[in-house]
Image (cartoon, rainbow, N blue to C red):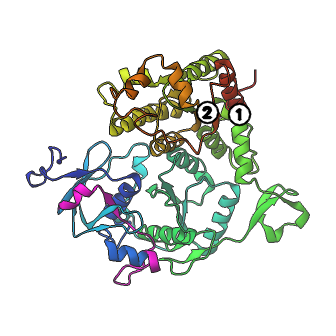
Amino acid sequence: MTAEAGLPDMLRDLPTWTPDPVELADLELVLAGVFRPLTGFLGSFDTAMVIAGGRLADGTPWPVPVTLAVPKELTAHDRLVLQDPEGVPLAVLEVTETWQDPTTQEWRLAGPLEALRSPAHGPFHKLRRRPAEMPPADGPVLAVATRSPLHRKHLGQLRQVAERLGSRVLVLPLLGGRHDESLVRALLGVRKELPDGTEIIPVPLPARGGDPERDVLLHAQVAAAYGATHLLAERETEGTAIPVVVPEPWAYDADVEVWRPVARIEPDHVQAELTPERLGELLDAGDPVPDWFTPPAVAAELALARPPKHSRGITVFFTGLSGSGKSTVARGLADALVERGGRTVTLLDGDVVRRLLSAGLTFSRADRDLNIRRIGFVAAEITKHGGAAICAPIAPYAATRAEVRRMVSAAGDFILVHVATPLEECERRDRKGLYAKARAGLIPEFTGISDPYERPEDADLTLDTSRMTPDEAVGRVLDLLVAGGWVRPE
């Protein structure tokens, strides 16, 4: 694939590539100067040194690898246009090294980046700032980098530390999660409770799932780029770009009904804080979050981001061999959910999807995977908007099912149902004569005969329709949804 029109003539014949979300965020932060001193993606030696000791090959401290994975066919080029998911060119990579990751075996490219245009941003784009756009600091600046709203305890600790330092406050919501806009709204909602002059600047920095200590190092690096002189964090870490300040413990004083330092509270007046698990239980049940724990503006955003389970978007994904009964059970479930009300219900049956959404696709493995991804994409959109998507494809490959689970889970809840009816029973039913044709060699790559079906190891429910009626199977699925809180009992 070559770069689109609209580029300078010398770049139009270059190959293009769309990095994954973490790599796109890294690309933006490198180009914006947030990841200074980096000017591009790291090579094999720099990456190995960062992983081993938190330093680049030249000795410069740097906490995390910043690399670019590409298909092997792109490793033959010395320049590459990097684009966003909509195909908008963002930068040109001048390839200085092609290397293979010894852990993942992925091919990677290294080299400096030349910016073509800034990434397009949606909501709250006016809050985005480059470090170069920040006014010079005229005193201490305390930064807090967060993926979560600031509750009353955090607000109190932040005000206390800022007052002690005599500093301005910089709040950096770290984007790249499921509820980015809700996080920013929650922080804007408590702006009046933050010190005067507080700035809120969203930063695209998806969680890497790595070492918490390196996360603090990276957050300090980002905060320093924006002019912060101190970082508020929950743990002390050596080697940070700016000093880390750990606030003293705070708790809720039930006697005077305020949050304050634990040292100033009588032990029998300390009220236990809401744990994340308890907070999740309240939201799942649709119960109010107590005012003593968080301001009303934050509570409203929490409820919006995590609706009660009985009204939350959900995908129920059936998988099984042809003739296993999954379509029959899926239709029965869709009917039952419509009868109960509370959500819009969409049935994405394998055969119907093949005729419409995936018309023209073959039954090669690549096209079957694409068919499942299309179903997953539509199901995720339905789920994101609070609907119930009922899917019933064969979906024989575990990796593709896992991809759909990730896609949907970024928008709502996902339930996998394995309709594990034995192959012999599926062949006996064979209403369409497909198994007979496959046995005769007339249908190549037929799941269960000439192509494998990878049995799910992560199914939330397993059904064998040779041992139960369709109504009983639907009842089993409904029981699971009721027990999980997604469907109200009749």
Query: Which secondary structure lies at badge 1?
Result: loop
Q: Residue furthest right?
A: 268
Outermost residue, bottom side = 59
Q: Nearer the viewer, residue 245 or 344?
A: 344
Residue 286 makes an appearance in the image: no
Q: Is residue 406 above or below residue 163?
A: above
* Residue 262, percent from left and from top: 79, 68
Q: Indicate whether 363 appears above or below 35.
A: above
Residue drawn at (32%, 45%) of the image: 85
Q: Mark 2 points at which residue?
A: 312
Residue 463 visible from this viewpoint: yes
User: Does residue 455 sit above or below 52 in this rendering?
Assistant: above
- Residue 7 % position (x, y): 15, 49
Q: Which residue is drawn at 19% across and 46% down?
A: 1
**In the drawing, what numbered circle is on residue 71?**
none
Residue carrying label 1 = 485
- Measuring from the top left, give residue 446's x and y in whole percent: 40, 32
Q: Position of residue 44 (x, y in %)?
A: 33, 73
Q: Is mark 2 on a helix, strand or loop?
A: loop
Three-letter residue code for mark 1: Gly
Does the stretch in magenta take in 55? Answer: yes
Q: Which quarter of the rendering shows the C terminus?
A: top right
* Amino acid of disc 2: Arg
Q: Magenta includes 129?
A: no
Rendered image quadrant of residue 65: bottom left
